[in-house]
Image (spheres, grey):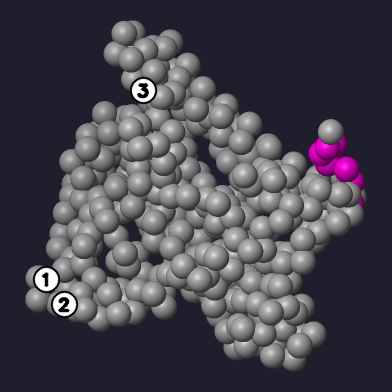
Amino acid sequence: MLGHTAPSLYDLRNLFQVNVEEGRHLWAMVYLLHAYFGRDGREEAEELLERHSGDANKPRILGTFNEPISDWLSFFMFTYFTDRDGKFQLKSLAESSFDPLARTCSFMLTEEAHHMFVGDTGINRVIRRALEVMKELNTDDPVAIRHAGAIDLPTVQRYLNFWFSSSLDLFGSESSSNAASYFANGLKGRPDEANYEDHVAAAQIYKLEVPDGSGGTKSEEIPMRNAMNDVTRGSYVRDCEIGVTRWNRLIEKAGHSFRLSLPSTRFRRNIGIWAGVPTDTTGKPITQEEYNARIGTWLPSESDRAYIMSLMHGVHEPAKMAAWIAPPDRGINNNPVDYEYVKMH
């Protein structure tokens, strides 16, 4: 479906590469299970291969991977935010004392970098095109931007809120005995473990801000090993901020006051200590009634999704680009942007 609606041959070619490499990542894990874990490994590998995104009977285990990606804005958000979770999980597993897993993950990280590049530059190009239209029309009115066939910045923010908050749950609960066990047994480390002085973390303490049950928060201390999920999530959030800062520079340079921002790690959580706790996008606890009344302004609405889908018409000719996205700054493998990246038959 995304292939049929690709905004250019450049994007279609990137889509193919992402799919090929993600498929190879799956088979790499299947190979490890077959090669080293006997009958249990073979059975687990078979279950891996049977699970499909959004399948009613055999869905993916983690909810984010079952979210529909029916448009290219969602695809760019997924490859920026959700693939970045993959980066940090792979960086943790690349520290594993189980050498075959560590070596495999180190290789997979080089491919994951391309997927995040697709997302980063894709969102960048959506913003650039919006800014071009805003300049042409001399307005930042979202309705006018949409009438001109571009994607307005508030809609980009709502999609960002959705995919970032959804991806946060992939790291698991803030306090986890499983995370402590994985670390203690050498299965996983922290991303870039060499940056830490204490690689045992047996006596360290980690401070958490947790809900106090009355609409506020309180500080709680847990063993560092139990907090490894949250340590990794913190590294992920800081990495996500880098791209947001770049996108905001574009907006600032164009002379507009609007700024994109990441919502709080407390917002819209379904796993962990903040699961089911209603907060606004800054992380402030609010009533369920207020949350229900405002959630439509924070996340993509049905009309947002319908508008984005209305833009999804494939452009499969060299040197052509859909009107809702700017061309990339450069092509692939030293080829020009207007190169025939995919031959259509």
Indicate the quadrant where residue 295 lies: bottom left
Q: Amino acid at mark 1?
A: Asp
Q: Amino acid at mark 2?
A: Gly
Q: Amino acid at mark 3?
A: Glu
Q: Residue at x 56, y 34 (%)?
A: 22
**Image marks 2 and 3: residues in contact by CB distance under 8 Å:** no
Residue placed under numbered mark 1 in the picture:
212
Residue 329 at what x, y percent from top left?
Answer: 81, 60
Q: Residue at x 50, y 71 (%)?
A: 303
Residue 68 at what x, y percent from top left?
Answer: 47, 50
Query: Left or right: 188 with respect to 332?
Result: left
Residue placed under numbered mark 3 in the picture:
47
Determine crowd level at label 3: few under 14, some 14-19, many 20+ residues with C-alpha closer than 10 A. Answer: few
In reply to whether residue 253 is colored magenta, the answer given is no
Outermost top residue: 38
Residue 340 at what x, y percent from top left?
Answer: 88, 43
**Image marks 2 and 1: residues in contact by CB distance under 8 Å:** yes
Query: Left or right: 177 with respect to 75?
Result: left
Numbered tag placed on residue 216 in the rendering? 2
Q: Residue at x 21, y 62 (%)?
A: 276
Foreground residue among 25 and 71? 71
* Residue 268 drawn above or below residue 130: above
